[in-house]
C-alpha cells in the first residue's frame, strides 16, 4: 500500500537501489514540458471546453502529465470550484434505519464516483449534537452538505449550515431557495389507486393508516388517491384510522371487518400497516387477493416476505441519495424541489373484486 505522498510525488532509486522521493510534480512542470502556458495546462487538466485550445496543445499537455506522473491537487481544485473534495451527510437517525440503508449507499457511491469522500453523521434529532457534527466536519475540510431525514418532513436549518452549500434529502425547509430532493408521494398515491382501478375496483376501496396532516407522506399519498378517484367520478368508500405499525393496524382492520364491513380493496399507507391488515384478513377468513386486494407503499423487505407477496409503491432510496449528491456537486445547483418517481412493484396481493369473480363463476355454470 502506498501513502498519499507516494502517489503525489515522483519516485526514483539512487545508485544503491534505495527509493528516493523527489518533490511533487506541479502544473508548471507539466506546462514547461508541453511548451504551453500554465493557464493553458490548467484549462486542459480541469476539462475546460470554453477556451480555444488546439488539439495538438491539448495532447501535448496530457502526454506531459502522463510522462511526469502528474496528479492534480485536490486543494487547487477545491479553490477553483469553491467546494472541497469532501462532503458531509447529516441525518437524524437515517444512518441506522434499516429501510433507508440504500439512501446512504446511493449518496456514498455517487460521491466516490465523483472522486469525493463523504463523512456521515447522525444527530438523533439533537440540535447540540448536530452543531458539533457540523463544526467537526467543517474542521475536516467538508465543503458541502447533504441534510437527510428518515421520513419526509419540514426541517429548520441552522445558520451555520445555510452558510455552506447544502442539499436537503427526504425533507423540506421552511425557507425557499434550498435545493431539495424528495420522493414523489402524490404521484405514488395516483399510481397505487390506478393499479386497483385497472383490476376493476371502484366503490369499495378503503384507506388504512393515520392521516395526520403533519405527516407529509400520508397527506401527499391521500391527495393523489383522491385526485384519481375524483377523475373517475367516485371516492374512497371509507378509511380506517390507525398508527403505522402492524399491531395497531391489525386491531383496527380486524375491528372494521368484525363490524360487518366488506371492503373490495385496502390501500395501506405503508408496508407495516399492510402486514397487520394481512393478519386481520386471515383471521376473518378472507383470502388475499381472492376476497380482498391489498396495496401499499415503501416496498420494504417485508413486502416480498408476506404471502401472497405484497404489491407496493417503492421509495427509491438509492436514487434519492444519488440525486442529492449529484445536485450538490453541480456548478449551478437548482433551487427548486426535485421529486423522484416512486415505481410500483406489482405482486400477488391485488386482483379483480370478489363480486366480479363470483359473477364470472355464476356465468360459467
Image (cartoon, rainbow, N blue to C red):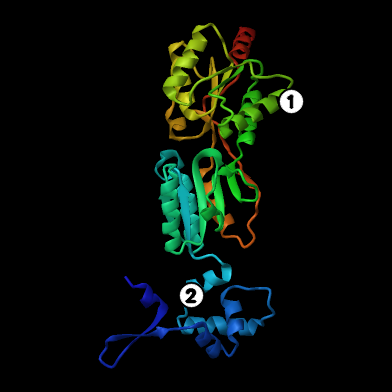
Q: Secondary structure at mark 2?
A: loop
Q: Report the residue at 67% width, 82% height from top.
A: 54
- Above-or-below relation of 308 to 131: above
Q: How many marks?
A: 2
> Is residue 245 among what the camera can see?
yes
Q: Secondary structure at mark 1?
A: helix
- Please tell me whether mark 2 or mark 1 is closer to you in this view: 2
The answer to whether any part of residue 118 appears in the image is no
Locate residue 251, reporting x and y percent: 45, 15
Task: Write the residue at 56% across / 83% down.
Answer: 61
Which label number is shown at residue 231? Answer: 1
Q: Position of residue 147 (x, y in %)?
A: 51, 49
Q: Position of residue 219 (x, y in %)?
A: 60, 30
What numbered label is drawn on residue 73?
A: 2
**Quadrant that contains the C terminus:** top right
Residue 231: quadrant of the picture:
top right
Q: CA distance from mark 2 to mark 1?
A: 58 Å
- Of residues 39 and 228, the one nearer the viewer is 39
Residue plotted at (50% across, 87% down): 29
Q: Is residue 264 above or below residue 125?
A: above
Q: Is residue 34 above or below residue 338?
A: below
From the viewer's side, name the closer residue of 217 and 163: 163
Sequence order check, earlier mark of 2 and 1: 2
- Would you call the spot at circle 1 few (<14 residues within 10 Å), some (14-19), or many (20 or more)? few
Amino acid at each position: 500500500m502506498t501513502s498519499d505522498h507516494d502517489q503525489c510525488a515522483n519516485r526514483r532509486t539512487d545508485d544503491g537501489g534505495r527509493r528516493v522521493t523527489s518533490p511533487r510534480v506541479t502544473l508548471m512542470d507539466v506546462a514547461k514540458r508541453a511548451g504551453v502556458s500554465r493557464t493553458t495546462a490548467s484549462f486542459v487538466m480541469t476539462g475546460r471546453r470554453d477556451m480555444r485550445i488546439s488539439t495538438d496543445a491539448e495532447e501535448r499537455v496530457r502526454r506531459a502529465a502522463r510522462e511526469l506522473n502528474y496528479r492534480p491537487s485536490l486543494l487547487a481544485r477545491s479553490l477553483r470550484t469553491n467546494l472541497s473534495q469532501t462532503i458531509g451527510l447529516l441525518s437524524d437517525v437515517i444512518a441506522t434505519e434499516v429501510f433507508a440503508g440504500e439512501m446512504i449507499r446511493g449518496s456514498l457511491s455517487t460521491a466516490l464516483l465523483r472522486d469525493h469522500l463523504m463523512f456521515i453523521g447522525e444527530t438523533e434529532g439533537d440540535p447540540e449534537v448536530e452543531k458539533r457534527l457540523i463544526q467537526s466536519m467543517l474542521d475536516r475540510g467538508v465543503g458541502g452538505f447533504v441534510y437527510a431525514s428518515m421520513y419526509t418532513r419540514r426541517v429548520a436549518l441552522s445558520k451555520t449550515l445555510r452558510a455552506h452549500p447544502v442539499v436537503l434529502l427526504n425533507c423540506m425547509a421552511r425557507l425557499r431557495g434550498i435545493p431539495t430532493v424528495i420522493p414523489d408521494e402524490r404521484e405514488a398515491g395516483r399510481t397505487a389507486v390506478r393499479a386497483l382501478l385497472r383490476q376493476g375496483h371502484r366503490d369499495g376501496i378503503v384507506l388504512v393508516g393515520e392521516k395526520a396532516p403533519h405527516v407529509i407522506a400520508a397527506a401527499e399519498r391521500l391527495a393523489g388517491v383522491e385526485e384519481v378517484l375524483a377523475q373517475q367520478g367516485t371516492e374512497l368508500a371509507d378509511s380506517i384510522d390507525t398508527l403505522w405499525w402492524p399491531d395497531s393496524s391489525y386491531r383496527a382492520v380486524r375491528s372494521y371487518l368484525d363490524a360487518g364491513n366488506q371492503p373490495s380493496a385496502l390501500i395501506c399507507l405503508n408496508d407495516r400497516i399492510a402486514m397487520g391488515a394481512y393478519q386481520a384478513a386471515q383471521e376473518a377468513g378472507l383470502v388475499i387477493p381472492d376476497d380482498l386486494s391489498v396495496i401499499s407503499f415503501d416496498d420494504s423487505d417485508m413486502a416480498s416476505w408476506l404471502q401472497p407477496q405484497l404489491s407496493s409503491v417503492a421509495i427509491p432510496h438509492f436514487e434519492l441519495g444519488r440525486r442529492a449528491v449529484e445536485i450538490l456537486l453541480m456548478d449551478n445547483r437548482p433551487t427548486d424541489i426535485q421529486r423522484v418517481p416512486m415505481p410500483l412493484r406489482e405482486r400477488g396481493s391485488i386482483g379483480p373484486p370478489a363480486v366480479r369473480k363470483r359473477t364470472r363463476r355464476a356465468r360459467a355454470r
